[in-house]
Image (cartoon, rainbow, N blue to C red):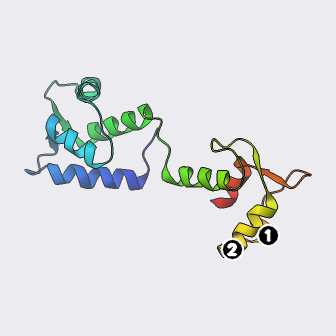
């Protein structure tokens, strides 16, 4: 799963904080601290596996490009869902849909929410609904984007 520009920037900032000598690499222990600071809490076994998969020269020193590969793999292994997706799912569930995106919500409830929170969503942003006035998670997600 590719990293967003913001994630790459966070990775660069974290990496640079631990690359004290400016040599462009960090060691394994520094890598663990960086990962922990980014919210990834790999076990020692997971960390060793990550390093084995990407440390081609056996130096146990990680450059930034390799660090990004580790972060991408860790993100994929964790079944990563970004915070916007989580927030959208929670809003959908609060309106009566399933917390996993299943089901549908009433367009009337969505309209009331828009009005209550004074959201900047116009009638053209509202999805086409089924005949019974319900919208799916896919349409809800597009509307909230």
Name the outermost residue toward the bottom.
118
Measured as percent of width and height from the top left, residue 41 is found at: 30, 39
Q: Is residue 29 rendered to the left or right of residue 136?
A: left
Mark 2 Cα shell of 10 Å, populated few (<14), some (14-19), many (≥20)? few
Closer to the chain start, of discs 2 and 1, is 2
Residue positioned 83% across, 56% down in the render: 128
* Residue 27 showing in the rendered view: no
Measured as percent of width and height from the top left, residue 138 is found at: 70, 47
What secondary structure is found at the residue carrying circle 2?
helix
Along the line of sight, the residue nearer the viewer: 127 or 20: 127
Disc on res. 123: 1
Measured as percent of width and height from the top left, residue 57 is found at: 17, 25
Reply above or below: 125 against 77. below
What secondary structure is found at the residue carrying circle 1?
helix
Name the outermost residue toward the right.
131
Reply above or below: 138 against 74. below
Residue positioned 54% across, 50% down in the render: 86
Name the outermost residue toward the left.
21
Q: Is residue 143 rendered to the left or right of residue 52?
A: right
Quadrant that contains the C terminus: bottom right
Reply above or below: 130 against 109. above
Along the line of sight, the residue nearer the viewer: 70 or 88: 88
Disc on res. 116: 2
Which quadrant holds residue 116? bottom right
Mark 1 Cα shell of 10 Å, populated few (<14), some (14-19), many (≥20)? few
């Amino acid at each position: 799963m590719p990293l967003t520009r913001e994630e790459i920037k966070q990775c660069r900032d974290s990496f640079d904080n631990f690359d004290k000598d400016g040599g462009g690499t960090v060691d394994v222990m520094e890598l663990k601290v960086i990962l922990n600071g980014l919210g990834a809490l790999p076990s020692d076994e997971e960390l060793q596996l990550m390093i084995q998969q990407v440390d081609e020269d056996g130096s146990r020193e990680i450059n930034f490009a390799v660090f990004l590969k580790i972060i991408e793999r860790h993100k994929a292994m964790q079944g990563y869902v970004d915070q916007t997706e989580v927030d959208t799912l929670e809003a959908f569930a609060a309106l009566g849909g399933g917390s996993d995106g299943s089901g549908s919500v009433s367009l009337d409830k969505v309209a009331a929410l828009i009005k209550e929170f004074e959201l900047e969503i116009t009638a053209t942003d509202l999805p086409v609904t089924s005949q019974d006035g319900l919208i799916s998670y896919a349409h809800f997600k597009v509307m909230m984007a």
